[in-house]
Image: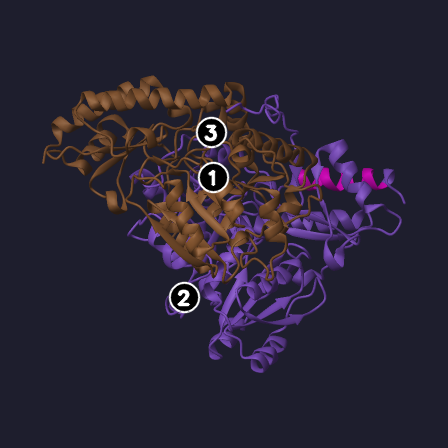
Chain colours: A purple, B brown
């Protein structure tokens, strides 16, 4: 048979622009993390890789402040973590109460309903968070088996407080499931002390690792629900009853893990331990404050009220006289800086600015604020 | 709140053994591929990354010998490709006929049934392939809407021929779905000329890229079935109607792609083009033949008959007097070589030896055959 050459394009070696990623993620991984990524590939059942798996699990436990046995990276990106959390915890007919205050709450509703969940939406405007009383009333009304909340809404920059929520859930026989994609490694987060039962995240935000893995954690209560399901998890790829045997002491083959991504995640987490969570969280907060002050000085306000404002992701209100999209293009064309626009309810209204992981540093804030000032002067409506 | 230090383990920098991966995959990526992996991360909507996405798609079309518009890498490993192919093409109640002649045929049955498929199994012993007549009878009996066959069974080393199968399927209104995880880039494969409607693969075998992405391709007929589904795809993460909008001209955000893995895949595919498919397939065949001859010389036969034998993965029968597991350990401990044992029907009976991608070369064969000879002398029962 003759080989068709029509798609055999001749490409040059990759030559990528050195972007500074100050949008909603990914953030720039530290050079140490990129170096680890390129170490020689091992087999997925190699004793040395199996050892590394345990190390990654233990480091994730530290980052998440949990002792959950079932803490591991799913072989997919953050949204795969969301799908995995829901695929396992929701059985057809289960009532799931979802706090919708942004794009990712919406996504939870969509995924949960595909897995047969009866989705009850609890809505507040994008940028707000949920009060304990509101949650209490909704739980009493809907009697859900799962309450899903987004800790750090990447679409709005709001940070959901968790005081009292787990107690409320557990006293009503309800599991607490949280999206911590944009908080893990950058924002105070205590899975065990806060009583969170299920959480998932991504590697490419505050952990400062490239995208490609989705850390996930289930506590004993959550695993009990999963192990007593009447029907198998619809998704074989994300089925924790199988995945946990590969990541557990059995090491039973399930699928080939993204080996090199695991190296990178180990290195990124090793840097979290070296820095220490308290210092790291404080660094994220101090640099975010520097950004908020800097923005204010050039006449830009933040969309989220100070007490609920996320340090890792800021939604900055676009001044009326400025062409927001033009500013985004200008920053990329003139300074190789990526920031992003708003989506959903905030489309056209805000810029989304991320200071995550390795990128949360004073020099980036100083550069960005001055670059935005320059861009605004060139991008009037 | 006080930070719990109990999981804050202090780890040394990674120091991995230089394994030669001659098992069922992953194979060792070429240094150029590992270098590409470590290039600075871009945003997933960056114009430069969007350009790279199109390049990867075009290169995949060449490797697969297809002009299918919907050809792209899924953000998961090979098994995620399998799940994606089935999640999209199977609706609850659809009859799917599955050729089961190894472990991955079994897995197709498992995943298809979770998505509500009525699975009809067609079985032959592990190591055999399916005759056209057998398939014809089964298609007439079960009237399936999808026939699933594994082109290259990684668990057995058998290579399924495709002469006449697509015509048979299409004349019965049935789609042809194939697993090409261990053939893409190493074994002759013509998606369009053979009339295959859906196929998925992995990056870590004959393409010589680390694991972490699952190339997939759907032709117009397959997309027609998917777009006219009565119900949404259960899996949001693998839903082609959404993913195709991110990889299509719209570039609508769906999830964050594993950016750095895409760099590596581009480089691996660029090397496929540089070498040329014909040369590459021939190289895989010549080195496999060298292996088969070498094994024969030291008294080892192959499990699969010559006409159906896969060049990329050889199942070598373990001589009766030899402790197969001990040989595997010996090769790793003494030579840093990974080969693997058999699974399922072939557990304890064979070694699985892969010569895939960059690893398919004469020096590896010479080393391996002599290392096995040495190991056998040390590992008598």
The CA distance from mark 1 to mark 2 is: 30 Å
Residue at the disc numbered 2:
A226
- At a point 79% along the width and 52% down the height, the residue shown is A348
Question: Left or right of B88: which side holds A57?
Answer: left
Disc 3 secondary structure class: loop
Nearer to us in this view, B236 or A149: B236
Image position of A182 with respect to A326: above or below: below
Pointer 1 and pointer 2 on the same chain: no
Decide: is B120 above or below A334: below
User: Answer yes or no: do the residues labelled 1 and 2 have beta carbons within 8 Å?
Assistant: no
Q: Point out which mark residue A195 bears.
A: none
State the mark number for residue B201. Answer: 1
Residues tagged 3 and 2 counted as in contact (Cβ below 8 A): no
Residue A327 vs residue A110, the one in the foreground: A110
- With B367 as the anchor, is B236 left or right in this view? right
Whether discs 1 and 3 lie on one chain: the answer is yes
Q: Is residue A371 magenta?
A: yes
Counting from the top left corner in percent of width and height, residue B73 is at 55, 40
Question: Residue A349 placed where, x, y %?
Answer: 79, 54
Q: Chain of mark 2?
A: A
Mark 3 neighbour class, 10 Å CA radius: few under 14, some 14 to 19, many 20 or more:
many
- Nearest the eye: A229 or A173: A229
Splitting the image into 4 quarters, where does residue B56 fall? Answer: top right
| Residue under numbered circle 3 | B185
Q: Which residues are magenta?
A: A363-376
Q: Indicate the position of residue B150 as horizontal and vertical percent values.
A: 41, 42
Residue at 55% x, 32% y: name it: B60
Is B314 inside the magenta-drawn segment? no
Q: Classify A24 as above or below A86.
A: above
CA gap, disc 1 to disc 3? 10 Å
């Amino acid at each position: 048979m003759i080989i068709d050459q029509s798609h055999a394009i001749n490409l040059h070696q990759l030559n990528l622009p050195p972007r500074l990623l100050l949008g909603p993620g990914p953030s720039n991984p530290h050079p140490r993390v990129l170096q680890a990524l390129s170490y020689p590939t091992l087999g997925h059942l190699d004793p040395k890789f199996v050892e590394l798996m345990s190390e990654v699990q233990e480091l994730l436990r530290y980052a998440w402040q949990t002792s959950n046995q079932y803490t591991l990276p799913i072989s997919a990106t953050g949204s795969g973590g969301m799908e995995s959390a829901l695929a396992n915890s929701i059985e057809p007919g289960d009532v799931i109460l979802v706090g919708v205050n942004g794009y990712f709450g919406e996504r939870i509703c969509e995924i949960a309903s595909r897995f047969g969940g009866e989705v009850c939406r609890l809505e507040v405007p994008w940028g707000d968070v949920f009060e304990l009383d509101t949650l209490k009333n909704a739980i009493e009304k809907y009697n859900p088996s799962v309450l899903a909340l987004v800790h750090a809404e990447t679409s709005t920059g709001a940070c959901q407080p968790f005081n009292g929520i787990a107690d409320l859930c557990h006293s009503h026989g309800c599991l607490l499931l949280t999206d911590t994609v944009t908080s893990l490694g950058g924002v105070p987060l205590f899975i065990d002390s806060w009583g969170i039962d299920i959480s998932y995240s991504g590697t490419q935000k505050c952990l400062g690792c490239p995208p490609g893995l989705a850390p996930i954690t289930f506590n004993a209560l959550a695993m009990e629900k999963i192990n007593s399901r009447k029907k198998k998890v619809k998704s074989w790829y994300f089925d924790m009853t199988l995945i946990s045997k590969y990541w557990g002491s059995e090491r039973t083959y399930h699928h080939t893990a993204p080996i090199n991504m695991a190296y990178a995640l180990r290195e990124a987490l090793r840097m979290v331990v070296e820095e220490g969570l308290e210092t790291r969280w404080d660094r994220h907060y101090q640099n975010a404050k520097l950004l908020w002050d800097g923005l204010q000085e050039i006449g830009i306000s933040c969309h989220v009220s100070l007490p609920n404002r996320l340090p890792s992701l800021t939604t900055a209100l676009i001044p009326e006289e400025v062409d927001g999209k033009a500013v985004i293009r200008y920053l990329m064309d003139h300074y190789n800086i990526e920031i992003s626009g708003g989506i959903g309810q905030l489309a056209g209204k805000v810029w989304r600015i991320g200071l995550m992981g390795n990128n949360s540093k004073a020099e980036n804030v100083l550069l960005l604020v001055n670059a935005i000032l320059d861009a605004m002067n060139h991008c009037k409506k």
